[in-house]
Image (cartoon, rainbow, N blue to C red):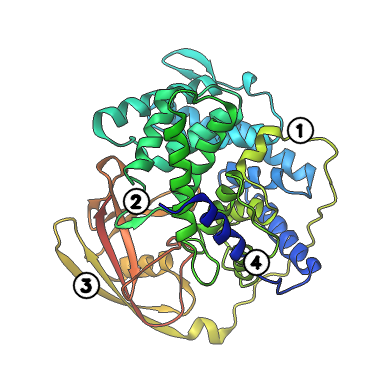
């Protein structure tokens, strides 16, 4: 394990001279703010609590649009959560994000209730019970019924809301850090380490974990080490889509992340290149670029907020004939849980999303079928050729292109050239 002094030195070493002026940094922040506001304008899509949380933690606001989105959270998302609870689905992660989103708007959480087993209970009571159930599930099967990312998010939401987190609940997370249970397939899950770091730091700061304080400190040190050693030469921590949460966690745990740190510069560069066109991705980097974390919600007072953010009309995207007429060949290999492989080919317009490519393949080849489920990150594959990859079975469809795992979802990943896409039923 790296000593804390060395970790601090490594964090300082990550800073470098800013490539651009402060004004340019503000332009990036304004662009992300505006893109997040625009993402809320689609009434057909369910309201996203992570987007709301990021906008509320921002330094500039469009309070009218934020209040409109808050009302949609309290109606549409609230009803969706109620339906899930009525069907006894474990949704601690979504409940936690809903809690954080409402708290970021300084909403009275004690007035938010759900019906569980024909009894009205407050949001925080429901979330606390969900976390107790998850704790029991870990004791029985050595893992949550959801995953440790959601488990961490639940602890964080309770803690920043001033609800005492049961020692046995936080102990399960500490043990998971100790035994390195934060993996997605064969890869270390930087996102989970980051969320666990924020959750455990909140527990420590709140004084909820008096017994076993030494184990808590060791877990936090381990998380810092994991995040620090995951930093790449280009400044990213893990990959482009885990850097935002990783920076948030380092900030929450007391590390100095300067305005010109390599990790912040990497995210600014990605933002300028439109890497973060998914609202969930933008919602995780915006607080980090403003050197804030989700722990900031704990002391957010909603007073004297800057209400100057204005959305200008956007020009429609024009697709030229040359773009739409260029076809690229895609080979799709499907590998079942039993290792049986099937290979298909399809030509798709250049720039198509992977989802569009799969739809074309499905229409042209009766032997290929797939189904998707919705999530805050967008649609994800749930069934391919009649075989499911269910969270309850600890399985998922791992996607790779020419042997490299995809970091984007099927609706975000764009096909620009001929390639081989592999869809493999994988356990975790």
Disc number for residue 183:
2
First in sequence: mark 1 or mark 4? 4
Q: Residues within 10 Å of mark 3 (few under 14, many from 20)?
A: few
Residue 279 can be seen in this image: yes
Q: Which residue is mark 4?
A: 268
Q: Which residue is mark 3?
A: 343
Disc number for residue 108:
none
Q: Residues within 10 Å of mark 1 (few under 14, many from 20)?
A: few
Q: CA distance from mark 4 to mark 2?
A: 27 Å
First in sequence: mark 3 or mark 2? 2
Q: Position of residue 202 (x, y in %)?
A: 56, 34
Q: Nearer the viewer, residue 153 or 370?
A: 153
Q: CA distance from mark 3 to mark 1?
A: 56 Å
Q: Which residue is mark 1?
A: 301
Position of 175 with respect to 152 (left or right) is left
Q: CA distance from mark 2 to mark 1?
A: 36 Å
Residue 78 can be seen in this image: no
């Amino acid at each position: 394990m790296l000593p804390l002094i060395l970790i601090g030195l490594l964090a300082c070493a990550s800073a470098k001279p800013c490539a651009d002026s402060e004004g340019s940094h503000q332009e990036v922040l304004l662009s992300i703010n505006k893109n997040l506001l625009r993402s809320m304008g689609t009434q057909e899509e369910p309201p996203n609590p992570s987007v709301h949380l990021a906008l509320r933690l921002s330094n500039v606001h469009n309070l009218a649009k934020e209040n409109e989105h808050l009302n949609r959270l309290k109606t549409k998302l609230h009803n969706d959560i109620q339906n899930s609870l009525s069907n006894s689905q474990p949704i601690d992660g979504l409940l936690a994000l809903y809690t954080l989103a409402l708290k970021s708007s300084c909403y009275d959480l004690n007035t938010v209730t759900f019906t569980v087993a024909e009894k009205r209970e407050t949001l925080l009571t429901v979330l606390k019970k969900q976390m107790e159930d998850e704790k029991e599930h870990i004791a029985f099967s050595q893992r949550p019924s959801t995953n440790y990312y959601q488990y961490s998010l639940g602890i964080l939401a309770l803690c920043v809301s001033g609800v005492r987190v049961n020692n046995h609940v936080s102990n399960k997370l500490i043990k998971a850090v100790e035994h390195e249970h934060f993996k997605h397939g064969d890869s270390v899950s930087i996102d989970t380490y980051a969320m666990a770091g924020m959750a455990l730091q909140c527990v420590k700061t709140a004084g909820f974990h008096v017994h076993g304080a030494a184990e808590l400190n060791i877990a936090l040190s381990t998380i810092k080490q994991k995040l620090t050693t995951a930093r790449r030469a280009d400044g990213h921590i893990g990959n482009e889509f885990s850097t935002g949460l990783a920076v948030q966690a380092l900030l929450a745990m007391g590390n100095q992340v300067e305005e010109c740190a390599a990790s912040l510069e990497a995210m600014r560069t990605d933002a300028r290149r439109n890497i973060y066109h998914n609202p969930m991705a933008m919602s995780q980097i915006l607080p980090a670029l403003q050197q804030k974390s989700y722990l900031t919600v704990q002391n957010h007072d909603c007073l004297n907020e800057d209400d100057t953010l204005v959305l200008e009309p956007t020009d429609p995207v024009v697709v030229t004939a040359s773009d739409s007429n260029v076809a690229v060949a895609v080979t799709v290999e499907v590998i079942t849980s039993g290792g049986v492989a099937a290979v298909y080919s399809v030509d798709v317009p250049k720039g198509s999303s992977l989802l569009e490519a799969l739809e074309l393949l499905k229409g042209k080849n009766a032997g290929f079928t797939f189904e998707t489920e919705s999530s805050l990150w967008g649609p994800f594959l749930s069934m391919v050729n009649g075989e499911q990859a269910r969270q309850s079975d600890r399985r998922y469809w791992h996607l790779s292109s020419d042997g490299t795992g995809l970091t984007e979802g099927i609706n975000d990943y764009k096909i620009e050239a001929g390639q081989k896409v592999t869809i493999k039923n994988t356990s975790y």
